[in-house]
Amino acid sequence: MLVIIVITVVVLYVILAAKMPKAALVTSPVATIAFFMLSLTSESPAAAGISLLILPAGLLSLVADKRAWARKVVKGLFQVLGGGCLLAIAVFLWPLALMLSPIFITIILRYLLIARNSRALYVISTIGTAMRQNLPLAMALETAAGQNSDKRARILRGISKWLVQGHSLSDAIKQGYRGCPAQAVAMIIAAEEIDQVPRALRSIEADMVEKADESKKVKPVDMAYPFIVLSCAFFIVMGLMIFIVPNFAAVLSDMSDGETSLPAPTQFLLNFSNLLFGGRGIVLLGFVGVIAGTISIATFIRFRARRPQRPYLLSRIGDFLKWHLPFLRWFEMNYSLVQVVSFLKVSLNAGCALDEAIRNSLRLDTNYFFQKRLKRWLRKVEAGDNVSSAAGKSGMGRPIAWAFDDKVNEANTPEILGMLEEFYRSNYNFRINIAKSAAMPFMVLGLGAIVGFIVFAMFMPMFTILSVLTADVVP
């Protein structure tokens, strides 16, 4: 009888959620607790289980409700539920939590990065659309934000507020959108000097769209795959070395009177495990601390906005490594050339003098050491040297020198710079894809070798035990 009553209450709460969602939201927790305690008192497990459906039944309307309070409640419930599940896994299934932690970290970082890029593209596209349509920018951003309360709307309102106070677009973005990519801010600052902000925004949008399209492509093997595989293999091997392999060692020692030990590969992994977990786990804590610190610093650098005019120390160290490592230097040089060539083209089309265009290009977010070449080129141009030869002597590359050669390309430099921009951009993307395609087979071979060594080390003790048994049985 109690089971029928509880089922009836669940049905009633489904109807109540459709007709009076606020009443269902307030009373469903109380009704769930009351019927659950009544079912336990009456020793009815079926009724107790069904009574737990009262709360979800009362919250059904919130899923489809578009009102702000409903969305906030659903978001809060999902956060509490997700946090509770993660806490339960961490407490009761901590070995599984350790093994799955690399996957969770990768997913969270990937989500945050994609969300940040998507948010930046939305904000820049909204600003660019408003400017190209000659709308009052502050009013257009306020209208685009509407009555929404998400992060995108708050950013648009923040930029609009600073624009109303009389600040420039770059200052408004710095104050109202502190998470804006430094490359976009630097391009807008430089474009304001030559009054070409709409064209700069169009170029920024093109770069962001290209990166977004690249992130949406289906890849045969994700670059995070090796990290996840190695992390899971590490926890599995350490578990085997702590709980399983020592028993094999004891069996071998007893069977052979101490004359036979573990095979060398297995002994190597066992010694490594003892090194990590010996001494009260000090070495393990240090190892985990180094990895966690490296991931934290890399994440901090990745999400922190750069300062092109006053680079941070870590930014300079990163630029130094990328500029002086043989393989990465070409990509850093090519990526910087894409931005500089694009800006020089816009500047020359706007009627700027060449020295002014080069000086403004120093505001762009390019490699710190590439900017030294730009400054050298600027000094030579201001000293009256030939622009083409000065570009070649400053290390800007032969294509740039050819674009400014008066004898070959007289009065045709902006068009050639546009062609070079497309060339550098396509060449950069092509070599990036080639590098990823070439690196992946070596990465898979390395993973196969590591996993194969682990499997070999795990199976060798069993063959050793069989060999000892065979020697004892066969005369």
Image (cartoon, grey):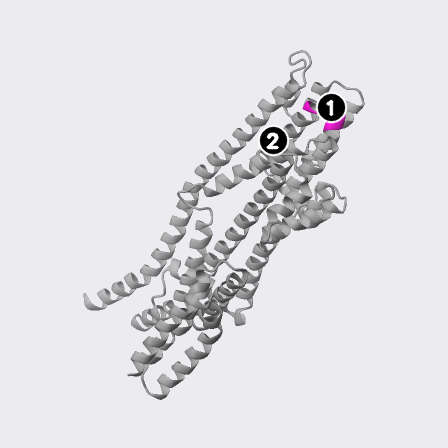
The image quadrant of residue 182 is: top right
The residue nearer to you, when weighing 251 against 77, is 77
Q: Nearer the viewer, residue 74 or 245?
A: 74
Q: Amino acid at mark 1?
A: Leu
* Residue matched to label 1: 354
Q: Of residues 436 and 471, which is closer to you in this image? A: 436
Establish if 358 lies above or below 469: above
Picture quarter with the N terminus:
bottom left
Whether the magenta-drawn stretch holds residue 92 is answered as no
x and y, in percent, of residue 181 in the image: 63, 44
Q: Which residue is mark 2?
A: 338
SS for callout 2 = helix
Residues drawn in magenta:
349-357
Spatial separation of the CA atoms under disc 1 and disc 2:
17 Å
Say which quarter of the image contains residue 363: top right
Place of residue 32 in the rendered image (x, y in percent of width and height, measured from the top left): 42, 78
At 43% from the left and 45% from the top, the residue drawn is: 443
